[in-house]
Amino acid sequence: MKTPKILLASLLFATTAAFAEPASEASIRQLLEVTQARELIDGMHTQIDAMTNAGIDQALAGKTPSDGEQQAIDNMKRKIGLLMRDELAWQRMEPIYLRLYRETLSEDEVVGMLDFYRTPAGQAMIRKMPLLMQKLMPELQGMMATMMPKMQKIQRDFLTDMKAARQ
């Protein structure tokens, strides 16, 4: 008769989780400060610039752009940079972080995270995460480059199948 005990334990856990105290705005703000969320958002701009440059280099395929093309490229890069800085500005992102953290995390979870991120190991994680992400991006871009032809073939096959199904 283990089933009733497992069911009872599951119900107890679900009930406890349902009544967990949502994280307070003050504790979330502390967590965002300790984890340097604002600095991470600001650092994303550098990564976006690098991704834009990589995309342009890939599109140029080793060709040197003319002066007019280079001017158009520079103009596009400037516009993308301005758009991203505006759309991903901390003033816009902070309310989203606050809402999502409050919807997702309990006060106990945020306090536990604060306890961890205030340790030397937690601080190392915060300091090294941008470098880790920076190293991960080229890996992901390489994976995407090899996946794209496969995804395009799947899409072509799908369109062929859809066309055949209509006949």
Image: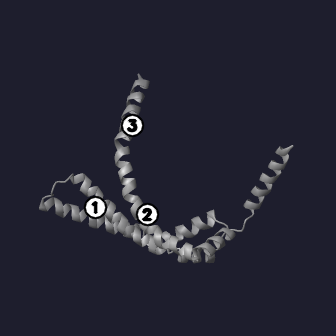
Residue at position x 31%, y 60% from top?
52
Residue under label 1: 53
SS type, badge 2: helix
Which amino acid type is shown beneath numbered disc 1?
Answer: Asn
User: In this rendering, is residue 65 above or below 2?
Assistant: below
Foreground of the two, 92 or 59: 59
Residue under label 2: 133
Instruction: Give the farthest residue toward the top.
Output: 167
Number of dots carrying numbers: 3
Residue under label 3: 155
Instruction: Give the farthest residue toward the right.
Output: 1
Q: Which of marks 2 and 1 is in front?
A: 2
* Cα–Cα span, label 3 and label 2: 30 Å
Residue at position x 23%, y 65% from top?
75
The image shows residue 160 at horizontal and vertical percentages of 38, 29
Which amino acid type is shown beneath numbered disc 2?
Answer: Met
SS type, badge 3: helix
